[in-house]
Image (cartoon, rainbow, N blue to C red):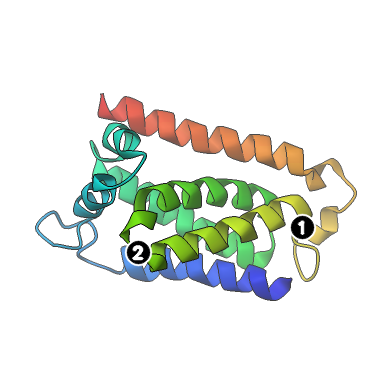
Amino acid sequence: MVIFRLIAGSIWIFAGVFDKLLNPNFFNPTSSQYVGFTIQYFAEGSPIKQFLYAVAFPHPILTGQLVMIGEISFGVLFMMGALTKLASTVAFYTNLVYFLSAAWTGAEEYGINLLLMAIDIYFLLGGAKDFSVDSLFQGSILWSSKLWFVIGSLIYLGVVILLYLHGL
């Protein structure tokens, strides 16, 4: 399953580096590619519209920066097979928000996020076994899916609360 880990990692790195970090328009409020316009567009038909307007829309640049850092981090951790269960948990929540925000826009957003959520669950439950840093910890408490699920969930919840409070 190394190939799935590498593919998922490369998708995350591509999204974080090329779509955001190296895209001068992503943080430019005068550009049609501005993250704020993307959030607004996704919210229009989303079942989590109120969540997006309460958490992401009040401060789109901070939201975009956090998403970018997350995507690059998920990619690097997946590629290395390091903290894969933690990365899988936080990536799952990120993909779930993307899925609920953007799936209504078409098959591309629907398909990629659904596929990545399945990969996230696979690696959360099974870990990165072959050719990974995580394989050094098989059998120890650090291999526990429950531990990393709780930690990852708390991290994601903390970021959402931070964004919400920052927007008040």
Q: Residues within 10 Å of mark 1 (few under 14, many from 20)?
A: some
Q: Along the polypeptide, which appears first: circle 2 or circle 1?
A: 2
Percent of width and height locating residue 83: 68, 52
Q: Is residue 114 left or right of residue 148?
A: left
In the orientation shown, which residue stands out farthest toward the bottom? 3
Q: Is residue 119 above or below residue 22?
A: above
| Label ID, residue 134 | 1
Spatial CA distance of label 2 from label 1 is 36 Å
Q: Is residue 33 visible?
A: yes
Percent of width and height locating residue 24: 22, 66
Name the mark nearer the viewer: 2 or 1: 2
Q: Nearer the viewer, residue 62 or 96?
A: 96
**SS at circle 2:** loop
Percent of width and height locating residue 168: 26, 23
Q: Nearer the viewer, residue 53 or 108?
A: 108
In the orientation shown, which residue stands out farthest toward the right? 139
Amino acid at the residue labelled 1: Asp
Amino acid at the residue labelled 2: Gly
In the image, what residue occupies the spot 20% across and 63% down? 33
Q: Is residue 84 left or right of residue 143?
A: left
Assess whether mark 1 and mark 2 are in contact (beta carbons under 8 angstroms): no
Residue 127 appears in which quarter of the rendering? bottom right
Q: Is residue 74 above or below residue 63?
A: below
Q: Residues within 10 Å of mark 2 (few under 14, many from 20)?
A: few
Residue 152 appears in which quarter of the rendering? top right
In the image, what residue occupies the spot 51% across and 38% down? 156
Query: Pointer 2: what residue?
Result: 106
